[in-house]
Amino acid sequence: MTPLLSLTVVLAAALTLTGCGGRATTHHKPGTTHQEATGSSGTLLPARDETGHRLRELPAADAPTVRAEARPDPEGGWNVHLAVERFRFTPESTGGAALPGRGHARLLVDGRETARMYGPWGYVPPGAHTLTVRLHADDHTVWAVSGSPVQTTVRLDGTPGTPATSPAPGASATPGAPATPATPGASVAPVPTSPPPADAGRTVTLTITGKTVEPPLSRIELKKGERLTLRVTADRADTVHVHGYDRELRLSPGTPATLTLLADRTGLFEVETHESGLVLTQLVVR
């Protein structure tokens, strides 16, 4: 076989493996910048939500819906259950194309984004008053109808044992966030005091200055089932990502931000920043 013919065969094989028929890589790599609009579903709008994500418009008949129910947890906080229609959670393809009826939910606690949900059950720590659940596509854009995010809002002030239920799919009580109309006759739970937290768990404080993290990199030893709160202050805007738990925390310059998680998964997990790529600490859960 001549050298030219050999090169032709190699190139043909490479094109076969990487051509349009190949399966695209869709997993979002922690620490990389989120990409906009890699799919063709819906209409990408210029508008953004208050967290900076673009809206992706769908006709109401094709758009997903979400309802949320929050029940007091016996150890404090709230267990949240989502009921969705025309939608399924796809953690395996987060960061990929925006395909109809796929994606994840993001939780805004008292108007601030604190976590994602890749399934119907989640947890909100003690002290929260309002929870907004918003549906996102795999490419992180926000599913929207008539220019408003597909979301629902729950007031976390029900009495112990009484679930607080969202008023309607798409309804919003988040300050500054657009809202879709509520269903006629829908109601919101009454306003008694929320249950007191039973165990606040451990709190770790971290400070980021330039490329320096204080205290220096170390491992946080946790027992499975233990609750951990990370309190992070940075000198620039960034996002903290907890690997393995897919939890994120947005940072504003000079403003302390907190993220609370339940260590219900064993192993070694790094906590790093997206933009600066700093490893802040490591969680060891046994």
Image: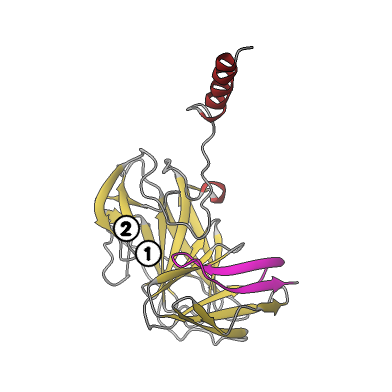
Q: Position of residue 19 (x, y in %)?
A: 50, 27
Q: Nearer the viewer, residue 1 or 87?
A: 1
Residue 68: in sight, yes or no?
A: yes
Q: Nearer the viewer, residue 258 or 24?
A: 24
Local SS, label 1: loop
Q: Position of residue 182 (x, y in %)?
A: 30, 60
How many numbered discs, if any? 2
User: Which residue position holds label 1?
Assistant: 167
> Do residues under tags 2 and 1 come within 8 Å of each other at their CB atoms?
yes
Label 2 amino acid?
Answer: Thr
Q: Residues within 10 Å of mark 2 (few under 14, many from 20)?
A: few
First-in-chain label (2 vs 1): 1
Q: Is residue 136 magenta?
A: no
Q: Which mark is residue 183?
A: 2
- On screen, residue 219 versus residue 238, left or right, reads right
Label 1 amino acid?
Answer: Pro
Image quadrant holding the N terminus, namely top right
Stretch in magenta: 263-285
Local SS, label 2: loop
Q: Nearer the viewer, residue 146 or 265?
A: 265
